[in-house]
Image: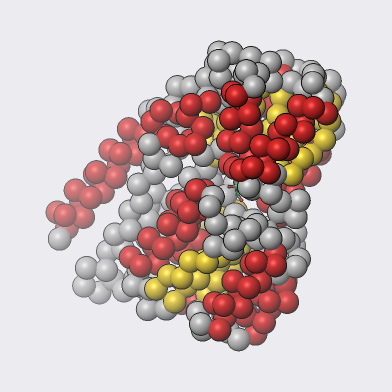
Amino acid sequence: MKKKLLSVMLCITLTASMLVGCSGKPSSNGTTDTTPTKPAETNTDNGSGDAGSADPYATDGTYAIIVKSAGNPYNKKESDGYKQVIEAQGGTCVIQEPESATAEDQITCINNVVSQGVDAIAIAANDTDALEPALKQAMDQGIHVMSLDSAVNANSREVFVNQAGTREIAQTLMDAILDISGGEGNWAILSAASTATNQNAWIDGMKEVMQDSKYSKLNLIGVYYGDDQYQASVDQTAAILTDDPNVKVICAPTTVGIMAAAKVLQDEGLTGKVKLTGLGLPSEMADYIGADDAHSCPYMYLWNPIQLGNLAAYVSIGLVNGVITGAAGETFTVPDTTLGDNGSYTIKEAADGGTEIILGAPFAFTPENIAEWSAVY
Ligand code: RAM
């Protein structure tokens, strides 16, 4: 048993070091440094085979994850990651995908899973406040509630699993825009739903970062909302190009939006004139990332959505088992050493008055590493 565990650990270590070697993070002057990242593989070996080591994350409960909407591959990877851990730990997973990225459709999903009597709900919110009555009702019935990816307000959750620091994402994107634009010019934001907590927090953060004189020659012409739907995002990209034929950079902090914008720029032959960055799924953006004028996107960022789901699942189980309460300052260790600091996390105060757990840092996808990562997620 010990021998087997050792070889699994060795294999994970080797995989980790292989992936560290191929990562790169653009700096503000466009050069790259090597910032280690997490391996994409998940170690769900909880060691429960060893006599006497009871797994605090073992469960026979039922766990619901409600994503933002159906038809978005990012959401699918997030829910796959959640399900993978819930099932590996002995639980049952219920995945709910609202038809559209609206609060209304998510309320229907919340009511569905509450009537099924689940033990916990993890939700990526389409709206910060509108889900509060439905989620409070769930909590009143003893169901544990947390959010991931996009937070519900502090009253409606026990804790939020945030993909990366909100301010950090905002700063990273502003620096990319500054770099890609050459320090000046018109730029636009192509967002998701106008009520999405995560995109709105990043956009607010970017507007704050922009106050620094370093960004004074950048002119934000507007925020456009593609609702995390492909066609609406295509239409909104076209609207940006019509509204400002001189727009230099589009920043899309949504995987659906960035991919739709990339397709429009390619089809219109504008890849050399209008540049693109933001948050994208490597598997969807591989064809559009490149340093030359045949490609619209010099580089972009994201995190591992599968690991976001993995971590959220451990946190849901932790809440149900009483291992985690969600209080600021609390520390916990999940049985997956590829997450956090060898599986360890500290719960922090969030800017909205609630608490959060941060998965890690945003990771840059560049012409050098995109081929490798596009095969992973
Ligand atoms: C979209 C969703 C999601 C966001 C990513 C970056 O898939 O809006 O919430 O985190 O983009």
**Number of numbered markers:** 0
Q: Position of residue 52 (x, y in %)?
A: 25, 74
The residue shown at (72%, 60%) is 127
Q: Position of residue 8 (x, y in %)?
A: 23, 50
Q: Is residue 143 left or right of residue 50?
A: right
Q: Is residue 126 above or below residue 165?
A: below
Q: Nearer the viewer, residue 342 or 197?
A: 197
Q: Is residue 197 left or right of residue 10?
A: right
For the C terminus, which image quadrant? Answer: top left
- Kindly tell me whether residue 215 is visible in this rendering: no
The residue shown at (79%, 39%) is 223
Q: Position of residue 256 (x, y in %)?
A: 59, 42
Colouring scheme applied when the structure was drawn: secondary structure
Q: Is residue 46 left or right of residue 241?
A: left
The residue shown at (38%, 31%) is 372
The residue shown at (64%, 48%) is 228
Q: Is residue 354 left or right of residue 266?
A: right
For the N terminus, which image quadrant? Answer: bottom left
Q: Is residue 11 above or below residue 125?
A: above
Q: Nearer the viewer, residue 78 or 244?
A: 244
Q: Nearer the viewer, residue 19 or 81?
A: 81
Q: Is residue 10 above or below residue 60?
A: above
Q: Position of residue 242 (x, y in %)?
A: 79, 27
